[in-house]
């Protein structure tokens, strides 16, 4: 057993397991590619025990690159479906919300209150306190439009 740990291939395989566990513990899908590259190098180092360490390191870098490219291609062709596709797109999540103008929109620029913060806004001129709907975003500015008044309802 002790002889087995003297072999560099065993350490590559241990590294692959550690990276695989790290991928499970830490969110994301990036370490798994390095784990695959380490596993491949572990097997190759066992098959070719006289392989110099420098060649193994270069091989690891090459296999990691190949694994990342294959992984990207896989995720592009088979995207992960989610119940909330806008989870990480904060601007897109705001589209359609009705907000209040906090700094009058004049000459197309002003500010609106979104939750507990204020955002720069662009849209038709509107006085402070006007209800507007978010229609899109330009960089960090929100595009807004006036909310049509409902008959029989004030404000």
Image: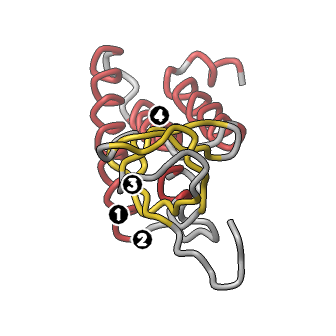
* Circles 3, 1 touching at the beta carbon (< 8 Å): no
Residue 155 lies left or right of residue 69; in this view the side is: right
Image coordinates for residue 50, horizontal then vertical, percent: 35, 21
Is 76 situated left or right of 24 in this image?
left
Q: Callout 2: helix, strand or loop?
A: loop
Nearer the observer, disc 4 or disc 1? 1
To which residue does mark 4 refer? 38
**CB-based contact (under 8 Å), mark 1 and mark 2:** yes
Residue pictured at 58% horizontal, 59% vertical: 131
Mark closest to the chain's N terminus, 3 or 2 = 2
First in sequence, mark 4 or 1: give its number.
4
Quadrant for residue 63, please give it. top left
Give me the C-alpha separation between circle 4 and circle 1: 24 Å
Nearer to us: label 3 or label 1: 3
- Disc on res. 76: 1
Callout count: 4
Q: Quadrant of the N terminus?
A: top right
Which mark, by number, is residue 131? none
Q: Is residue 24 above or below residue 131?
A: above
Label 1: element kind: helix
Residue 129 shown left or right of residue 135 in the figure: right
Cα gap from disc 4 to disc 2, whole angstroms: 25 Å
SS for callout 3? strand
- 52 and 132: which one is in front? 132
Q: Which residue is mark 3?
A: 143
Spatial CA distance of label 3 from label 1 is 30 Å
Lower sequence index among marks 3 and 4: 4
Picture residue at 36% right of the left edge, 30% below the top? 60
């Amino acid at each position: 057993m002790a002889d087995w740990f003297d072999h560099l291939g065993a350490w590559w395989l241990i590294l692959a397991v550690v990276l695989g566990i790290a991928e499970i513990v830490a969110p994301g899908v990036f370490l798994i590619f390095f784990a695959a590259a380490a596993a491949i190098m572990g097997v190759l180092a066992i098959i070719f025990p006289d392989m110099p360490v420098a060649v193994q390191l270069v091989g690891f870098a090459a296999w990691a690159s190949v694994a990342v490219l294959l992984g990207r291609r896989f995720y592009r062709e088979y995207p992960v479906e989610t119940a909330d596709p806008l989870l990480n797109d904060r601007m897109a999540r705001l589209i359609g919300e009705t907000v209040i103008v906090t700094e009058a929109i004049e000459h197309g620029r002003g500010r609106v209150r979104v939750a507990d913060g204020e955002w720069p806004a662009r849209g038709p001129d509107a006085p402070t306190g006007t209800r507007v709907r978010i229609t899109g975003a330009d960089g960090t500015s929100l595009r807004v439009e006036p909310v049509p008044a409902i008959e029989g309802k004030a404000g």
